Image (spheres, coloured by chain):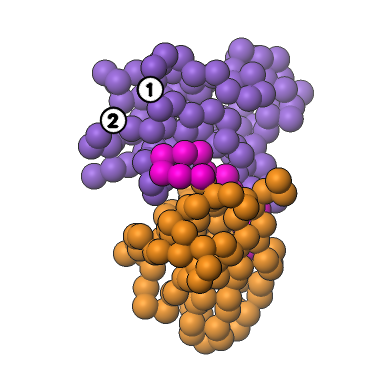
Amino acid sequence: AQSVTQPDIHITVSEGASLELRCNYSYGATPYLFWYVQSPGQGLQLLLKYFSGDTLVQGIKGFEAEFKRSQSSFNLRKPSVHWSDAAEYFCAVGNDKIIFGKGTRLHILP
Amino acid sequence: DTGVSQDPRHKITKRGQNVTFRCDPISEHNRLYWYRQTLGQGPEFLTYFQNEAQLEKSRLLSDRFSAERPKGSFSTLEIQRTEQGDSAMYLCASSEARQETQYFGPGTRLLVL
């Protein structure tokens, strides 16, 4: 079955610290992988996507993600978080319809 | 390019009533998608269109739900005889073509009393 697992429901980091959000997927074919961010009252915004090629993908707002086929993972990273990064982050996989994980809520300590 | 728009942004209704939501995609986008998001969950796929053709419907979409995209532009999602379990955020997205990035609208939040 196709699925996305985000094992961390909440993560808290201090402003300026590094961040890694975990994502594992189960998908029958070569997946198209995404990370979206959702702020309160806002729609989903695409941070980055992986279709093929270089397994380290750069996105907006200083985020990057690495596709590891052997681990079925697509973890999101940022070297130094800002207070404005506090939001909910969704990992997703799909071709036509997208399958989303349950999300990880990121909290930032001042 | 004004992005994907949805109307209304909020809807409160009583159980048993019918509601209709509208989505206007980005103008040159052929594909339009509907998702539902409940509290604490990620969005779940409901259905999608290529132009006016509805290509796939999720099992989540019961007989009380119907979606249309009559001229291949805007789309409507109707829920008949609403139930409290229908309370959710209904998200619309559009893309230029298959496997292209889906851009999401702000959503319509439905509360069924």
Mark 1 residue type: Ser
Q: Residues within 10 Å of mark 1 (few under 14, many from 20)?
A: few
Which chain is tinted orange? B
Relative to B34, B108 lies left or right: right
Q: What's the colour of chain A in the image?
A: purple
Q: Nearer the viewer, residue A78 or A106?
A: A78
Give coordinates of residue A95: x percent, y percent.
Answer: 37, 41
- Tell me, yes or no, whether the two marked residues, 1 and 2, touch with CB atoms within 8 Å: yes
Mark 2 residue type: Thr
Give coordinates of residue A82: x percent, y percent.
Answer: 72, 22
**Identity of the residue drawn at 46% across and 44% down:** B97
Q: Which residues are magenta?
A: B96-108
**Identity of the residue drawn at 28% across and 35% down:** A26
Instruction: For mark 1, give the secondary structure.
Output: loop
Numbered label attached to residue A30:
2
Kindly indicate the quadrant of the structure image that contains residue A53. top left
